[in-house]
């Protein structure tokens, strides 16, 4: 599975999350401790917000630890809201278009997890993407499809509801044409003002997800794994949760796409 990290708060250099900590995202890319794959070498990406509404985006297919451009970029760019991802493919090709985060307008999105048996219903999933968002379909991943379907479900006005509706549609396809585990996911996405995060699974094995507020940085990190071994203050987010982070404020609500399916 992939590893990712996101940050919201006072602007910091990207390297303070991505490369400098002892168990930074780059360290996790070749030495993850809380996922099935210890090596995440199928590309990486960073989306960061600055003075413009749309995020900057840098993605490549190299392992994160071997790209000197990434190291230089993270040492020079400061941002108060950014998303970073290292990829371990679950079947699709290693290509720049399949690297997270994905971006459409001011929205950015990244995902870790799996949709059981996706290859068996990939065409059905593609058909769920609204025509107005299909031109943004550049890769072949279930993650990008989920993002574009959620945009069509109204992410702009109802982020939680849109993600629940998109997730339950994927879950229904997996139950009909795919295989278990039907959905396991953690994802982070942003509109440039707020950071949203979800932890969910149809079984008891949702990917790990933690958060920590830093008084020294005046910001919050949301991560697949804590950035320092033995560092206090990291809190694990509960399975089945939808989280909103804005400034130092945080809210957690239940994320229950299954309820939509039961009501149908």
Image (tube, rainbow, N blue to C red):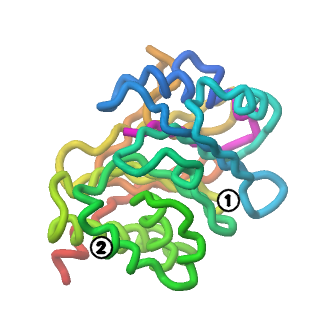
Pinpoint residue 126: horizontal percent, then vertical percent. Answer: 40, 74
Please give the name of the residue rendered at 57% of the width and 55% of the height, measured from the top-left corner.
Answer: 97
Please give the name of the residue rendered at 38% of the width and 59% of the height, measured from the top-left corner.
Answer: 253
Q: Secondary structure at mark 2?
A: helix
Above or below 103: residue 93? above
Of the pair 123 and 225, the residue shown nearer to us: 123
Q: Earlier in the sequence, mark 1 or mark 2?
A: 2
Mark 2 closeness class: few <14, some 14–19, many ≥20 residues within 10 Å: some
Numbered badge on residue 169? 2
Residue 11 seen in the current view: yes
What is the quadrant of residue 264 in the picture?
bottom left
Above or below 73: residue 91? below
Label 1 vs label 2: CA separation?
Answer: 27 Å
Task: Give the magenta-colored segment's residue range.
Answer: 1-15
Above or below 26: residue 255? below
Give the number of the mark in front: 1 or 2.
Answer: 2
Of the pair 167 and 71, the residue shown nearer to us: 71
Of the pair 239 and 40, the residue shown nearer to us: 40
Give the residue number, with chain letter if any, for mark 1. Answer: 193
Quadrant in which the N terminus appears: top left
């Amino acid at each position: 599975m992939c590893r990712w990290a996101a940050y919201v708060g006072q602007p910091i250099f990207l390297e303070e999350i991505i490369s400098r900590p002892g168990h930074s995202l780059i360290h996790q890319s070749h030495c993850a401790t809380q996922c099935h794959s210890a090596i995440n070498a199928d590309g990486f990406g960073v989306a960061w917000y600055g003075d413009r509404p749309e995020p900057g985006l840098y993605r490549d297919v190299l392992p994160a630890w071997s790209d000197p451009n990434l190291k230089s970029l993270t040492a020079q760019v400061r941002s108060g809201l950014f998303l970073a991802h290292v990829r371990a493919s679950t079947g699709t090709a290693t290509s720049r278009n399949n690297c997270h985060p994905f971006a459409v307008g001011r929205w950015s999105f990244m995902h870790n997890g799996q949709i059981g048996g996706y290859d068996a219903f990939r065409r059905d999933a593609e058909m769920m993407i609204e025509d107005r968002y299909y031109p943004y379909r550049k890769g072949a991943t279930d993650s990008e499809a989920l993002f574009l379907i959620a945009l069509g479900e109204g992410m702009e006005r109802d982020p939680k509801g849109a993600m629940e509706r998109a997730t339950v549609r994927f879950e229904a396809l997996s139950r009909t044409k795919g295989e278990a585990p039907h959905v396991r996911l953690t994802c982070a996405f942003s509109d440039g003002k707020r950071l949203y995060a979800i932890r969910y699974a149809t079984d008891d094995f949702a990917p790990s997800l933690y958060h920590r507020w830093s008084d020294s940085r005046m910001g919050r990190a949301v991560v697949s794994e804590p950035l320092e071994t033995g560092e206090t203050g990291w809190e694990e987010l509960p399975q089945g949760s939808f989280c909103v982070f804005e400034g130092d404020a945080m809210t957690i609500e239940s994320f229950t796409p299954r309820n939509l399916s039961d009501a149908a």
